[in-house]
Image: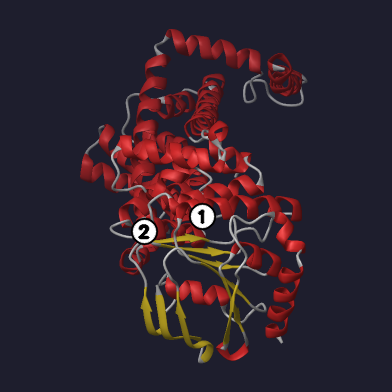
Amino acid sequence: MQAKKTFSFVLPLLVFLFLWEALARSGLVSIALFPPPTRVFSALFALLSEGFMLDILASIKRALAGLVLGSFLGVLIGLATGRISFVDKNLSPILHIFRALPPVALIPLFIVWFGIGDSSKVLSIALAVLFVAWLNTHIGAQRVPVHYIRAASMLTKSGGGLKTMKDVVFPATLPFSIAGIRNGIAIAFIMVYVSELAGASQGIGYWIEVSQMTYAIDKMVAALAVLGLLAAATDTAFVKLTQRVFPWMQKL
Amino acid sequence: MALHNLSVGYDGRKVLENINLTLKEGEFVSLVGRSGVGKTTLFNAICGFVPFQGKVIAPKQLGYVPQEHSLFPWLNVSENISFGLVNHSAEQARRVIGYYLNVTGLQEHAEKYPDELSGGERQRVAIARAFAPQPEVVLLDEPFGALDVHTRDKMHQWLTSFSEKERKPILFITHYLDEALFLSDRVLVLQEKSRMKDFEVGFQRPRKEEIKFSPEFMSLKKRILHAFE
């Protein structure tokens, strides 16, 4: 069963790599501008021998820190705006205005405010993730079926507000929040790349930029592939983690 | 529990008008009536879910079981039962959960999630969850409405012996007269314009399935059916 699963995952990937290799070597496109996977692999090994692993780790650290911070705040604020009408009325309009701003455009401002170091990068990633996590959680929290809320309020007549929020609204909203965070994962890796283009001396984005300037297209593609794989791996790990922590959710 | 001149209106239309009702200690009362006469609205007013005029004298701790799907899908059977046990120590809660797993016959399913249970099992958990915090009155809103006939009959048997053990006043909404007669000490028919007819059900307890076929049962059922008109 496991072997079959692995095979069904690996086979399309092998076909894709084969077609890519064939196209790159067919003469229809320039091999320098469109390097085949074999060249990209050797470029990746070359990069790794130049210490690329440290850059990968730096990018992972920034993306994950921003992702965790943004998701946590987004879910927390979403629960509040989704369920507490006073908070919704006062906070949601402001959040909608800020949500419309492209987070990428805030990076220069964040550099001015928080410096060139990791904090401006992590905070700009967190801000971008916050809005998707917030909006999804907000919508989910508003749609918690009324019979759950009523059942909880009857069972915990006195002072059950916080318990209802923690034990009913939060789990009932989770599928929405998780969808938001999965969007946030993709956004976090876009943001880590963009934030490393400006004012970074380390990171995958930094290497993509450097490779472009030195016209090392194979290294550029290798770094891009690593970025894409990292985002996909983070998403898969996140899904597996949620399935393990919240086993009931698969059956909803 | 008592209701005095209870009225509920939506959008300028009166759904319930001047309802008076008293529930005595340990009494099982069923509320029947055509769809739309306001049975569930009456429950919603008692629970404080909708605004109303008049007076509701109800204990602070009310048990409430809605029609279906009220169990929390993210909690297993034990966790659902213990949801209302907010002021219990871990040891007390464990004892209460153990008791209700036993009376619902769900000891084997304590760790299961609601979607892994049958419809009848789910409703037994919902009823146990409502009783666990020891409410003074329990409201059941068509708890067996979605079950098949066979399961429903089994649930009637279970609920009569369960309610006889618990001795709590119960107000029960149903569409099925057989169910109302089999379970109750009194059947209230809610008619159009909020008129209410009251029928005593004097069958001896413990009740057996066979009484549903007795002439007394049939004749009372006929009288109640007339009150629907």
Q: Residue at x 49, y 36 (%)?
A: A246
Q: Residue B18, position in %: x, y?
A: 47, 89
Q: For this view, does B2 lie left or right of residue A226?
A: left
Q: For this view, does A134 lie left or right of residue A231?
A: left
Q: Quadrant of residue B141?
A: bottom right
Q: How many tags in the picture?
A: 2
Residue tagged by mark 2? Answer: A98
Q: For this view, does B204 lie left or right of residue A207?
A: right
In space, the residues marked 2 and 1 are separated at their CA atoms by 60 Å
Q: Residue A43, position in %: x, y?
A: 54, 13
Q: Residue at x 47, y 46 (%)?
A: A174
**Element type where label 2 sits in the image:** helix
Q: Residue A157, position in %: x, y?
A: 34, 60
Subunit of label 1 = B
A235 versus B155 height, above or below: above
What residue occupies the far top of the structure in this picture?
A: A49
Viewer-side residue, A239 vs A169: A169
Subunit of label 2 = A
Residue tagged by mark 1? Answer: B164
- Res B82 seen here: yes
Q: Quadrant of residue B95?
A: top left
- Marking on residue B30: none
In front of the other: label 2 or label 1?
A: 1
